Image (cartoon, helix red, strand yellow):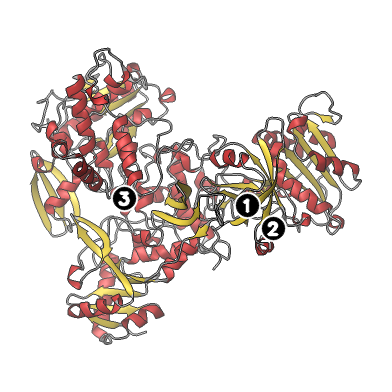
Amino acid sequence: MADKILAKDKLAEFIAALQKDKDVFAPKLDNDRLVWAPLEKADDIVWEFSNTEMSPKDFFFPQTECMMHFKNDPKAEDGMIMQAEPELAKERALLNIRPCDAKAFGVLDMIFCQDEMTNDVYWRDKREKTLLIGLACNDPCPTCFCTTVGCGPHNEAGLDVLLVDLGDKLLARPISDKGAKALSALPEAAADDAAKAAELKKAAEDSITQGVGTDKISGAEVLDLFNLPMWDRVHESCLNCGTCTFCCPTCHCFDIQDEVQGEAGRRVRNWDYCMSWLFTVHGTGHNPRHGKKERVRQRFMHKFKYIPLKRGGEIGCVGCGRCVQLCPVNIDVREVVNSMNA
Amino acid sequence: MKNPYVPYPVKITKALVETEDKQLKSFWLDFLNPADAKAFDYTPGQFAELSVSGFGEIPIGIASSPTEGDTLLFTVNKVGHVTKKLHNMAEGDVMGVRGPLGNSYPLKEMEGKNVVIVAGGFAVTTLRSTVTWMLHPDNRAKYGKIDFIYGARTPGLLLYEDQWREWQKRDDIDCHITIDREAPGWDGLVGFVPTICEQVAPKPDNAVALICGPPVMIRFTQPVFDKLGWQPEQIVMSLENRMKCGIGICGRCNVGPEYVCKDGPVFTKAQLDKLPAEY
Amino acid sequence: MENQEVAQKIQEVAKKLLSEGKVSCVIGFEKGTVPMRERPFFAYTPEEAERLTWTSFCCNNLANFLVRRDLGEAGKVAVVAQGCVSRNIVGLIKENQISREQVFVIGVPSPGMLDRRKVQAEVGAEKVITEVSEDGEDLIVKGKGFEERVPRKKVMRDNCYTCVQRNPVIVDELIGAETEPTHGGNIDKVSAPWEKLQADDRWAEFAENYQTCIRCYACRDACPLCYCHVCFVDEAQPQWCGKTQDESDVLTYHVLRAFHCAGRCTDCGACESACPMGIKVRRLTSKIEKDIREMYGYQAGMDLESKPPMSVYRPDDPQEFIK
């Protein structure tokens, strides 16, 4: 599929076309915070940004999501019987999603939709109805390390379209058929536009100097990594809060709870986090991950050993660096992983 | 698209307090829609999420055997929010069942072998399912000698008495039912499960052992089997961990890379030896 | 004393304590991996003590780690403590969580810690800061294509600006000399904008303030008061508070937590510094702090002797507010 060109002064048209059958969202500045919000007009688009404060996983996996509802009346017909929530009514487009966040959805696809039984219909429905238009990262942050975890600032995996900012215009690369369709009205890019995009890609990749090594981790036995003495120190300052997991684009653990208000009952899922002692405690009080050390170790082992083992080598981290920036005690995933890989 | 989170509606057709401490109660459940019964195609060793609307779900091993028909049997220990509510539910009440979930006992790999079943306390549930399945005329010939070793603290804490009394009458299974200490009126064995295992001394040759029970029973039973020459590959166990989704996504039941709900709950000792003991 | 000099002194004291075996561990700060993120560090050997540092970005409350570690096994530990942290240590002693003998307090008069979010806003939200250093009353902030001097005063944490106790209240070894007790801000003004409002408007402001909360509980987990083995939000039987992002659940958490900290909060600001969303948690706690001060004449953790007002009953307790 040939690269296309989208002039920035033609953006209004492009967005209007998207909005015909889709709700369009894009990163927006809100009191110094970059958040995802409905896009009203092309002028509101932010072009210079590192990344949104939180990952956009909430679009597919909301922090609180009603899965089912029921009539809380045992005597009523259909009373107490769970009914699934309706599917997403309208398609959506996420404009200017960063390649790392899109890659994360690819990793999560492998977890939410594994086979006939492990087929998270809530996740799948929203994924299938959302167009991902990525914006390549030309100026990665010092906390970015995507290139060292199988991703990159211009990475295409998981996207439908990749946009590369060339100044007054965007190189628009169709990646999926869905993406090609969205770009069908645009003119083709010239050879030097593609060359310019390639240059930007190389410069962005080269600017990422700090990262993680994972070669030894992938060759090591689970128990050898699990029993490393480093775990005795890594957890010391950890507060066991949920910041790292909630800002993470690949963290996907959840809890399921029932709620009742009068006749209205619902079954809801909420994000949960492996740092919480509550996460694993048995009804008997026994807790397989009873201490801070066990819980901190789980998070890193899960992302860098367990997921790769189960998902054909795919790492459960895309190197977005949010946890590095937001951890209240600066536990830096790069340091931890490099110690695991030592 | 099948929604794996929506439980099948079922009706409690019979409920029975099983033990003298009233902690364990059995529920017989019938599907409201016959098509659901057909879809719920299970094998001994699997579990299901029992759903009580307004309270939540709880993963429980299936105690019935598919050879017994469409009615499902679950025996529930009263420990938390959901199970307390469940214990207060009565015949005729509607609830939900989601599953079947997890893997099962390796019934296929066990064919042609002698089978030793060791159960302690209420962990006997899925083993009741297994024994019932193996004793069914369609299946019995596939297996060699069957030993069933089952213990509880007192006679009143033993589950499924009618069932094992029936099995005791048969000559194609050796039942060794034991209680911890002498009790009035008890005519069976006395002694802890590991001790009984020592006396029964099952031979490891061409055999598989399915062992389920509280951690302390496992801890003392393991050395007995080791001493008799059993290899870790021959010992099969079923794990329990806190679960929510039951389909390998929500992240809390994992033991290393393996999800107890999806890759388990059944693992061989050889598999567990290579995993962190987070269970 | 300049922060760098303080850091030197902390290292010296820590090395001495560790090499003489007086403590098993010194809890202090080390340099973080990103600018303006000094982080808690546990030094067990004199060599490790060389990593200890002290800057204007030591924003965690280290008293927190006295209750989140098994001190029974650790023996005596030393903690680097400025005014608020020392007040929290006093609080933990009064609440029988630790004993005075278990802790060696390395006291440091607080320079007033700085707010990394304010620094970021000062240079521009879109700029990437790569290095921040201190030069007297200024910060030198560097990034790709820029270098700016920012006065410390302009970017001080709100709670440090309104601090009433910069000097540690209990000390085993003081680093440097005692300083002015306050930074001059008026703590009563923190809650003033909300106090003035009618109930409905106040509720609206309050809800707005916590709108971005993601319920990661970093505020709770960073707080040395929140040592409950099972926090009320985690309690399942009965479940006091829903787990969803619905406004009522989120606000229930914050209101109940704030009340649980009444008469105990030292206004250390660790909650605000920990919050990944930059929520002004103190809007709520400072009002309670003020009420406790005005109604009971009490400020948390100022001395070992006075009784915490919420754990004693007096026949002459002011009662208007309960009616």
Q: CA distance from mark 3 to mark 1?
A: 39 Å
Residue B74 horizontal/vertical position (percent): 68, 46
Camera-nearest label, 3 or 1: 1
Residue on which the image places disc 2: B42
Q: Residue furthest right?
A: B171
Relative height, residue C76 to residue A35 (above, below): above
Give me the residue at 36% from left, 21% from top. C98
Q: Disc number at residue B48?
A: 1
- Residue at disc 2, secondary structure: loop
Q: Chain of mark 1?
A: B
- Residue at disc 1, secondary structure: strand
Q: Chain of mark 2?
A: B
Say which label, 2 or 1, has the lower sequence index. Answer: 2
The foreground one among C246 and B31 is B31
Callout 2: few (<14), some (14-19), or many (20+) C-alpha neighbours within 10 Å?
many
> Left or right: where does residue C317 sit relative to residue B165?
left
Q: CA distance from mark 2 to mark 3?
A: 45 Å
Relative height, residue A63 to residue B194 (above, below): below
> Do we see residue C158 in this rendering?
yes
Give me the residue at 75% from left, 53% from top. B65
Residue on which the image places disc 3: A324
Residue A224 horizontal/vertical position (percent): 53, 46
Q: Amino acid at mark 3?
A: Val
